[in-house]
Image (cartoon, rainbow, N blue to C red):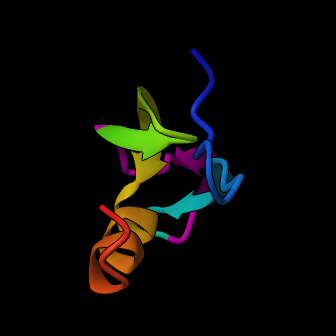
Amino acid sequence: MSKVCQITGKGPLSGNKRSHSLRATRRKWNVNLQKVKVVVDGKPQTLRISARALKTLKAKNSI
């Protein structure tokens, strides 16, 4: 499974990990995906949604 939010399309970001001596090595920040049951077009579906998108949907009473 890919680490992409099915609503917003957010994916992992990459950058450098910095040690105390400022030596740079590559690292990745993954999206905080949650499995949520959502009603889409009258049918319940399980979606993998980022925690930020889930928070927004809950605030708008969509879930």
Q: Position of residue 11 (x, y in %)?
A: 66, 48
Q: Position of residue 15 (x, y in %)?
A: 67, 59
Q: Position of residue 53 (x, y in %)?
A: 46, 67
Specify the quadrant that holds the C terminus.
Answer: bottom left
Instruction: Examine the image and state in which quarter residue 37 appears.
Output: top left
Q: Is residue 20 in view?
A: no
Instruction: Tell me which secondary structure the magenta stretch mostly adopts.
Output: strand
Q: Is residue 31 above or below residue 15?
A: above
Which residue is found at the position 43% from the left and 27% from the top? Answer: 45
Which residue is found at the position 68% from the left and 53% from the top? Answer: 14
User: Horizontally, is 63 left or right of 53 in the view?
Assistant: left
User: Horizontally, is 9 left or right of 44 in the view?
Assistant: right
In the foreground, 15 or 63: 63
Instruction: Please tell me how many numbered marks the rendered image carries.
Output: 0
In the foreground, 49 or 58: 58
Query: Can residue 8 be found in the magenta stretch?
Result: no
Residue at the extreme bottom of the image, as rendered: 59
Residue at the extreme top of the image, as rendered: 1
Residue at the extreme front of the image, as rendered: 42
Q: Is residue 44 in view?
A: yes
Specify the quadrant that holds the N terminus.
Answer: top right
Instruction: Examine the image and state in which quarter residue 6 appears.
Output: top right
Which residue is found at the position 40% from the left and 78% from the top? Answer: 56
In the foreground, 12 or 14: 12
Q: Position of residue 31 (x, y in %)?
A: 48, 50
Magenta residues, as a range?
22-36
Which residue is found at the position 37% from the left and 43% from the top? Answer: 38
Query: Can residue 30 be found in the magenta stretch?
Result: yes
Q: Is residue 20 above or below residue 43?
A: below
Q: Is residue 34 above or below residue 43?
A: below
